[in-house]
Image (cartoon, rainbow, N blue to C red):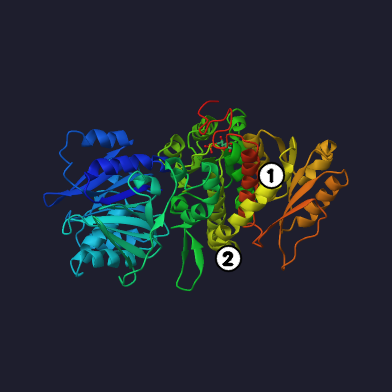
Amino acid sequence: MCGIIGYSGHRPAVPLLVEGLHRLEYRGYDSSGVAFEQAGRLHVVKAAGKLAALEAKLENNAYLLATSGIGHTRWATHGLPVEKNAHPHLSQDGDIAIIHNGIIENFQEIKDELSARGHTFLSDTDTEVLAHLIGEERKSAPSLCEAFARALRRAHGAYAVVMMGVEEPGVIYAARMAAPLLMGVGVGECFVASDIPAFLPYTREVVFLEDGEVARIEGAKWQVFSLADLSPVKKSVSHVPWDMQAAAKGGYKHFMLKEIMEQPRVITDCLTGRVSEGSDGELSVHLQELDDIPVPARLHIVACGTSYNAGLWGQQLLENVGGIPTDLDIASEFRYRDPILLPGEAVMVISQSGETADTLAALRLAKEKGCRVIGLCNVVGSSIAREADVVLYTQAGPEISVASTKAMCSQMVLLALMALYYGQRRTPAVFDRELLAALHALPEKLSAALPAMQERAGQLALRFASSRSFFYLGRGQCHALALEGALKLKELSYIHAEGYAAGEMKHGPIALIDPQFPTFALALDNALFPKVKSNIQEVLARQGRVIALVQEKNGKVPDLSVEELWVLPAAHPVISCFFALPALQLFSYQMADYLGKDVDQPRNLAKSVTVE
Ligand code: F6R
């Protein structure tokens, strides 16, 4: 996830671009850069680290004459966050500059082809390959726009790309495919950006670009074309009433809500480049990061909090689908219990931030004991990412809200992919085609379901906001979700909540059940449904109030005689968890918001727990 801005107008472009990048800082960044045209040449200035580093480089430079340019903040997904990988990237002849957000999946194939034609590359990025491809296409294309379109038609994957070329001073081109990009229309000036805050001080008139569209801006003029044939597309201008704060939150009231609603896109990003469709329509999983290490004889997952819950969710899949015996530890326990780690085994640490002190200590302990460490991490360049032997990045983008939501979703996707991947590597190979197909189809289905889920969560929050305690019950993979549901409720709304494996209730906790102690039961449509149903009966028999999260089956809703049924769409038993997770998150969010709590920064909590 990166921040993108392009400008064409009458103001000094460079300071405007840098200011716009500042307003995109919440998208996260590890390096940044700008490109502009001056005296018939493209100039690129970039720096690793915070924007201040770029500003320092731009100081005392007579760049103020340029009135168009492009700027980028990078949030690394591939390649280290160092200056050479920062955008913009240039074509071989230096006449075309581009910035890019997303992943060009077939970049290696294009790179090999261009290398054979004598191209040399200065970075490790897929973006530079695309810049070179546009330059190469320009040799035969009738115009820069046509070269841009030809190159993009060859690129597979998700992208938002903004380009400028020395041959058309003052003109900026932009195109999108499954990555955010929009246009701002001001007076005598136009903008393209990955998000509205980038240009909000200058205009609130916005044109939303769709996948497969190309925009051209030149001062006051703007046009949109279809990428397929460059035919003009009619677009309308919308007025956006948001202030800066609302814009950074994408119009949502809180970052947490934005991040919950972002999960379909996060899933798409996690799958991009990792799931491919063969010519026979067969899907397969690629985790190149793991190709060079032997299949572990046993995997020890170590993590904290929500990341631990994700690990618990993935454990069963890794065993059943991946065929890997898998243990699970809380990092703060693992580091002090002198674990037995045998040759051939591996430790996998899961951490959104990559900086959690206990998880990092567990990683170091594993390495000391000679064990290979796989990091499942969201933040590129974080301590865990740097110290692990192999890193799988979760591609959730920066998570601003202190309570983790979309990061857990991304961890679950990666764990499912790992299980499928190791299944493929088994002898004989095990292909869980149904699961992979369901995962592939998930983003669209989840996206369609989320608005109704938010509404239902709001109704239930209103009904249960006076409760002081909650049980969350689930079995199998839903046990992990029950723990996560309880964690989210307590950290956001400060209501006492306990997550339990539903079968454990009768061994003690059931003593707490009374009409004031409601239960949130995860009764999804899977093999354990009849067992959970019995556990719900046990709660009802003690006058407990129950909210049951269920799914439609053959158009019918299960009859559980509970106070509240929350019906989710029918889905594959593993994939149903990706619907249950945002349901639990939304319920906690609505409770906390209704109770007036500080949703994005709950008391006593920190986003990155770097102390023991
Ligand atoms: C809960 C939450 C925490 C973190 C935990 C581990 O909403 O955010 O429980 O999951 O502190 O953090 P990471 O994943 O950064 O290691």
Question: Quarter holding the C terminus?
Answer: top right
Q: Which marked residue is nearer to the observer: mark 1 or mark 2?
A: 1
Q: Residue at x 20, y 48 (%)?
A: 67
Q: Quick one: label 2, few (<14), some, or many (20+) residues within 10 Å?
A: few
> Could you say which quadrant of the image residue 605 lies in?
top right
Residue 564 image point, x, y percent: 76, 51
Q: Is residue 325 visible?
A: no
Q: Residue furthest right?
A: 541
> Which sits in the foreground, 582 or 322?
582
Q: Is residue 10 above or below residue 112?
A: above
Kindly state the secondary structure of the residue where label 1 is placed. Answer: helix
For disc 1, the marked residue is 461
Horizontal side of 369 relative to 143 (left or right) equals right
Mark number for residue 433?
2
Above or below: residue 128 compared with residue 144:
above
Q: Quadrant of residue 14?
A: top left
> Which quadrant of the frame does ligand 1 lie within?
top right
Tag 2 secondary structure: helix
The relative height of residue 277 versus residue 166 in the rendered view (above or below) is below
Residue type, label 2: Arg
Residue 363 seen in the figure: yes
Residue 155 falls left or right of residue 580: left
